[in-house]
Amino acid sequence: MKTTLPALFLLLALVSSGGAQNIDPSSLDGKVLLGYQGWFRCPGGGTMGTNWSHWANGVPAAASLVIDMYPDLREFEQGETCAVPGMTIGPNPASLFSSGNSRTVARHFSWMQQYGLDGVLVQRFVTDIPGSRAAGDAVLRNVMAAAERHGRVFAIEYDISGANAATVSAILQQDWRYLVETLGVTNHPRYLRHNGKPVVSVWGIGLNDTRHPPTDPDAVLELIRWFQTQAGVAYIGGTPAYWRTRSNDAATDARWSGVYEAMDGIQPWSVGRYNTIADVNRWRTDRLVPDIAEISRTGQVYMPVIFPGFSWYNLNRTAKQNQIPRLGGQFLWQQAFNAKAAGARMLKIAMFDEVNESTAIFKVAAQSQQAPDQGFWLNLDADGFKLPSDWYLRLAGEITRGFHGLAPFEAQTPATPGPPWPNTDGRMALTVLNVASRASGFQAPEAILAISGTGLPLAPLPGPNTISIVDSLGVSRFATILPGAAGQLGVLVPAETAAGSAAVILAAPDGTVSYGAAAIATVAPGIFSAAGDGQGPAAATLWVLRPDGTLSISAAASCAANVPCEAATLDVGPPGSLAVLVLYGTGIRGRSALDKVTCTIGSTDAPVLYAGPHGGSPGLDQVNVVLPGQMAGAGLVSIRLSVDGVAANATQINIR
């Protein structure tokens, strides 16, 4: 037997706190930016592409792969990926994504918003400019749309690798005019500026080879002056790591010192320049500290580059697998800590999506079961750590908070990096409760939560992709939003949510983000009370089938305006009657077996006939309990329900 849930069952008490974050596009100060390659394509047609660009040499296979890390695609939707012929993950086909798909780029920026990341330096390869423009600059347009939608910042970073020395300067100038005048990048509200000027980075200038022209310092100086005076930008140089001393990876001509000093900012490329924690610490002493001292003299900005690790075995089959181990995040964290301690005010993390050299921080396979069965894959457990797929997004979020001054930057790598994160007052912006019990402890898949907090969008209800729950495995799922009472939203926990710590994330259209904390378990039983506060008279009905065949249905409580709810007097009927109390709740349906659901009313064990979904409303559960005839005259008694050994909140009924 199932009944309709009365409206009073959804009355929720207001509990509020507040908090949000927004990314300021007017300054580089405090920013932690991510390199965004956006160079992946798969044969999905249209902007997705016609081939497997940057995934493999030809069709991906064990022998043709050029990536070492496999992206975690569990959140991706149908039509967003391409199946890889002949590659499988267990019984399922393996797939890969395309950066040309607007949904994929939007997903990446949604992750950035969820994990509190500032934004990206969009890589624009000089040698690829003709092809990018012929394809309508789909990836850049995707970035522009996603940055606005998710409140992140972006700027252009040119990569001059392999450019023609005779034409590179003219190409850069002409392309920048195109980006400004045709695509309107600098008119975009989320385009990054510094000191009132749009930011442009040019990577590769000054390296001691011929693959990164111009190699003539005077020609480079002329190019920088053009960007600064004609284009009116803040020019950031992606320089050699040893730019200051003009040694090792840097060109040695003394004129280069004048070139570097002419730049508005220095961004030394450090990927692969050190391999161990000891090397990282020496780098702080030998390079970071004197670099920053030099920058302080010239008044430029300084943006160190850090990276999580390195491996390019599939791209270079003579290389060592897992060449620079990530050490469970310690390698990345130590670099960030050292940069901040040395006085850096901004940072670049290389990279967001670079799985070719295994510097990606986005979600990747955490263990072998999540990667294809064919070929070599560097998974997050390679160094003996059991990590969720979003571990490096979490660490990047913590690093960003440290550079924003929102949290102390400790030397020790965080053991449990967020999200969720508290406000500056130490409290979460969102209060997350079981809608029935009002408990803030464990919650269950397919259970209804009551979420409150200042700034919560209530009227009209926020869109379907506003609240997400990130589970302990790193998977983010949008939650169904249900009507709630004043100041609250009802939220349905997605059915696939994994057990363990979880973050409830509200992402507002203006880019602000609010966090709440939850712990997910198989069951988290809550029983609705008539007053909606999880206490007192139960929001229940009593069904009594009498020996003469008549059926009566009675509400277990009565409520009136400005009057506390009271337990109604229930009649269990004459001897021989069957009296069934119907309780309503949430977080119950995940029970292991019916005999694991027990109910005690007063001091009497009451048999449980049914415990599971109500069926009429999402997330609503129902428990049918037999009231033994000997309970007649029991008076006001407590109802104590236990599901798989987990106690629900106690409510009451009054038996005549």
Image (cartoon, rainbow, N blue to C red):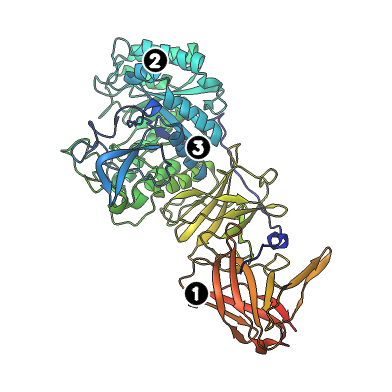
Q: Secondary structure at mark 2?
A: helix
- Quarter of the C terminus within the rendering: bottom right
Residue 258 visible? The answer is no
* CA distance separating discs 1 and 2: 70 Å
Q: Looking at the rendering, which quadrant does residue 553 occupy?
A: bottom right
**Residue 582 picture location, percent across and down:** 64, 72
Q: Nearer the viewer, residue 639 or 192?
A: 639
Q: Looking at the rendering, which quadrant does residue 639 occupy?
A: bottom right
Q: Nearer the viewer, residue 170 or 287?
A: 170
Residue placed under numbered mark 2 in the picture:
172
Please, is residue 331 above or below residue 42 in the view? below
Which numbered marker is on residue 594?
1
Callouts 3 and 2 close, C-beta under 8 Å: no
Callouts 1 and 3 close, C-beta under 8 Å: no
- Disc 1 crowd rating (10 Å Cα; few below 14, some 14-19, many 20+) is some
* Residue at the image position 55 percent from the left and 43 percent from the top: 465
Please, is residue 146 above or below residue 479 in the view? above
Which mark's residue is nearer the viewer, 1 or 3?
Answer: 1
Please, what is the three-letter code of the amino acid marked with disc 2? Leu
Q: Secondary structure at mark 3?
A: loop
* Residue at the image position 22 percent from the left and 31 percent from the top: 57
In the picture, measured across the screen, residue 339 lies left or right of residue 426, that is left
**What residue occupies the far front of the structure in this picture?**
548
Please, what is the three-letter code of the amino acid marked with disc 1? Leu
Residue placed under numbered mark 3 in the picture:
118
Callouts 1 and 2 close, C-beta under 8 Å: no
**Residue 16 picture location, percent across and down:** 68, 55
Q: Secondary structure at mark 1?
A: helix
Please, is residue 648 above or below residue 443 in the view? below
